[in-house]
Image (cartoon, rainbow, N blue to C red):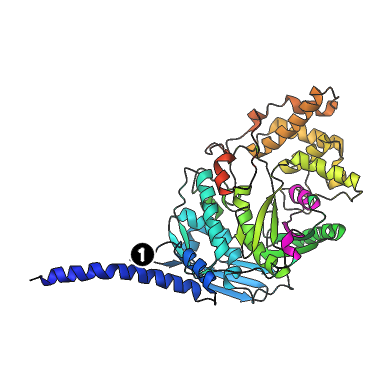
Amino acid sequence: MIKPLKIFVYSIACLLPLALEAEKAIRLADCLANRQVDYKAGQREARQATRLPRRTVNQEKINLIESVTVQKNVIKIEINEGFKKKYLLGDFFAQYDKDINLEPLDYTIQIMPFIMNVVSIVWISGRDYYIDAMDEELYASLEKVKEVFRRMYKKTSWQGRLIPRKLVKNTAPFSSTDRSENQYLALLFSGGLDSTASSLYHRHKKQLLITVWGHWDLPLHDEKLWNIRAEQLRDFGREYGHENAFIKSNYYSFLNRPVLDKISPEISSWRIFTVEGIGWAGLAAPLMLLKGYPELRHASTVTWDFKFPAAANPFVDDNIHFSGCWLKHDLFDMNRIEKCAFIADLCKKEQLSIPQIRVCEEKIVGNCCKCQKCVRTILELIVIGEKPADYGFDISEEAALRKSKEFMDKHTTGYTTVWHFMHMQELLAQRKARGEKIPQDLEWILSVDLNKKITKDIKFQDTINWHDFADLLPDIIIPTKKS
């Protein structure tokens, strides 16, 4: 006769597979409950649902978002207190232009501005955080981006997970029009050298120039500075026939940077190394969908031959897709001095107005002509034979050369600044090798030992080989490194 205990154990063994199947069914139901789908779409949802992280028995399910408030053009997000206390300085908000109405958008699109600015914090936290829903394309994209981070920062743990309770397949309202055929382009636009070069490079496309008020050089408390800068950006849009759009957000100031910058030795500047285009794409997402721009361009700062990783690169940006839209890293094959030459040649060839470029690190309207970004941009223009004053730098060529030399004589600086100076050196050396006469005022550039000018800002980072990332973006062409 079978003992009662054995009967009980046998019953549990039989029921356990059914319980596991029930859990799958619940998760699938969550994904399908949001909308009606046809049979094939349902099959796709089923496959996607099974790729969501499994729920761990008895694990606390921590909601990342406490509440979401949307009032026409403003979204406010109240954040989990524990997460906020550890990594942030407050809750999140984003305010769009008055012609924007966020209310009709799906919840998964409304929360993108916030989600995409904190997802890397979730990953590095080592914990699971839940949200009610996420755009299906974005979820798949972020999984790829997370793998890019793992390979860029190999000594850093990225075990945290952002888990949506359901996935939503959003479709861009303009997918059947010519807007999906590369005629319309949104561009992150600061009025600096990189974004100006990108705008002029794509000058024949209808552009939406997106600028966010709230970065470190445009603080939210300085409304006077913002109003002047916004008008300058509108002037560019009017001059070249493009539309401007503005966003006000604490996406930068709500980060507890002193804490985040110390989480990993590989990541000395949190936003530069782990957010950049991801966060800006999140802020731009509602605008793109409401105004009908499927593609967002993020102008490059460096190129393929830059030795160290940062978040601004094609393997991060080009893997971002959401709701029928996408992000693309722009002109990653063109360094700053080449961009200067491109702008100068284009303006002469097509008789365009020379753009007023603002690159300054100071919180002022124009360019200080003293900081490292001003100094190197002025020098780049002089090296290619242009007058800095024509581009918005209120300084004579003689004074600019003197200040540039003083800067390099007296200062060490980060690897990025030295890397840009290297391109000036290379260009002058190439000219000299061809027998061209180098202006005496520029000879000193060739004699500077730039290796001695580098500070230790990248001492904990490994150099990067982009060929190791090729499987994450199969269609991209990675140039062979110069010998």
Residue denoted by label 1: 59
In the rendered image, residue 177 lying in the magenta stretch gets the answer: no
- Total residue callouts: 1
Place of residue 15 in the rendered image (x, y in percent of width and height, measured from the top left)? 27, 71
Q: Is residue 182 magenta?
A: yes
The three-letter code of the residue at mark 1 reads Gln
Q: Residue 130 versus residue 3: which sits nearer the camera?
A: 3
**Residue 74, percent from left and from top:** 65, 72
Q: Nearer the viewer, residue 315 or 392?
A: 315
| Residue 349, image quadrant | top right
Relative height, residue 374 to residue 444 (above, below): below
* Image location of residue 312, percent across then percent down: 63, 48
**Front in this rendered view, residue 99 or 415:** 99
Residue interval drawn in magenta: 178-200
53 to the left or right of 447: left
- Give the secondary structure at mark 1: loop
In the rendered view of the protein, which quadrant contains the N terminus? bottom left
